[in-house]
Image: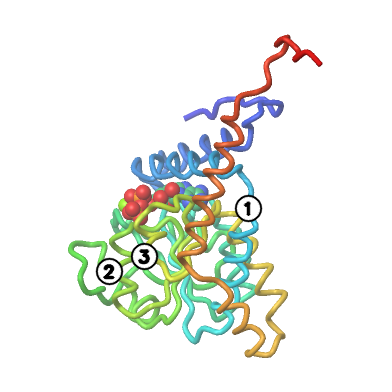
Amino acid sequence: MTAPTIPRSHPRYRSLMVRSDLAEKMAEGLVVPEGLMAHGRGEAFDYLLGEKTTPEAAKAERAAAAHLLLARHPVLSVNGNVAALAAAEVASLSKSLPRLTVEVNLFHRTPDRARRVADALRQAGVPTVLGEHPTARLRGLASDRAWVDAHGILRADVVVVPLEDGDRAEALVRAGKFVISVDLNPLSRTSQKAQLPIVDELTRALRHIDLGILRMRRWEPSRISTVAQSVEAPEVLSSALRRIRVRLDRLAAPEPRRGSPRRAG
Ligand code: ATP
Ligand code: MG
């Protein structure tokens, strides 16, 4: 497939480039068609939120960094969209926190796709990738979605699930994991189930978590713990919804009409 030429001057240049990249990666078998639709849903919420990290999301990202620093077995779960959009950010995070296990976790699993996702991560510089040959199953999930690695997600205490499906996020919470989601939709079941929902775009969220880790990694655990405890899930979600409401209210406010008659006096 030949990529369309997108002029740099286009106001949505970045978004169009990402779409074209995802379409190519679908043709290569890294991303599934359903992944393109999930991306579109994310884009819609990014639009509503103003396409930048909100102060509440930044606070949740700092708290996520703190949880990862304090975790004994932190795991980052990666699906096709995450590998396509953010392999470089995943690699950087795994350098900043070498204890972080990176595991391929696919909703639409085939051995070929699992290998492609793992290859994309290795090419970007992730030294070890689990999940190509999963060895255990998560309870309460039917089909191939239940497969996980016994040395990865199964034994994890903290799991980051970017762009995860609600069913699996719920199964991870039931399995006793502390679940940190990255999902632009504050209404998705994943955001609603996670103990720490981050309502932000994936690459922005991963970069901020990375910076938080670099900033806090030499801190005393008690100080890191204060940052970890500083965020409550219900507040994160309601503040994202409030932001959308306030923004839409402002945008929908009628403009003062030009040429309307001046009041006398
Ligand atoms: P749920 O199953 O949790 O109710 P869902 O069915 O709406 O969610 P899924 O396809 O299961 O959606 O998960 C993908 C989620 O990822 C969507 O909620 C979408 O908003 C979000 N998303 C997609 N692309 C991005 C992105 N680049 N950054 C952050 N979030 C994204
Ligand atoms: Mg879903």
Q: Is residue 149 left or right of residue 42?
A: left
Q: Is residue 174 left or right of residue 156?
A: left
- Can the viewer see residue 130? yes
- Say which label, 3 or 2, has the lower sequence index: 2
Measured Cα–Cα span from mark 3 to mark 2: 20 Å
- The answer to which of 236 and 145 lies nearer the viewer is 236
Residue at position x 52%, y 62% in the image: 236
- The answer to which of 214 and 90 lies nearer the viewer is 214
Residue position marked by numbered label 2 in the rendering = 147
Residue at position x 41%, y 40% in the image: 36
Q: Are marks 3 and 2 in contact (CB under 8 Å)?
A: no
Q: Residue furthest front?
A: 265
- The answer to which of 169 and 79 lies nearer the viewer is 169
- The image quadrant that residue 51 belongs to is top right
Q: Would the CB of label 2 be found within 8 Å of ligand 1?
A: no
Residue position marked by numbered label 3 in the rendering = 193
Residue position marked by numbered label 1 in the rendering = 53
Badge 2 crowding class, 10 Å Cα cut-off, few under 14, some 14 to 19, many 20 or more, is many
In percent of width and height, residue 63 lies at: 58, 72
* Dot 2 amino acid type: Trp
* Dot 3 amino acid type: Lys
In percent of width and height, residue 41 lies at: 42, 42
Q: Residue furthest left?
A: 142
Residue at position x 76%, y 13% in the image: 262
Q: Secondary structure at mark 2?
A: strand
Measured Cα–Cα span from mark 1 to mark 2: 33 Å
Residue at position x 18%, y 64% in the image: 142
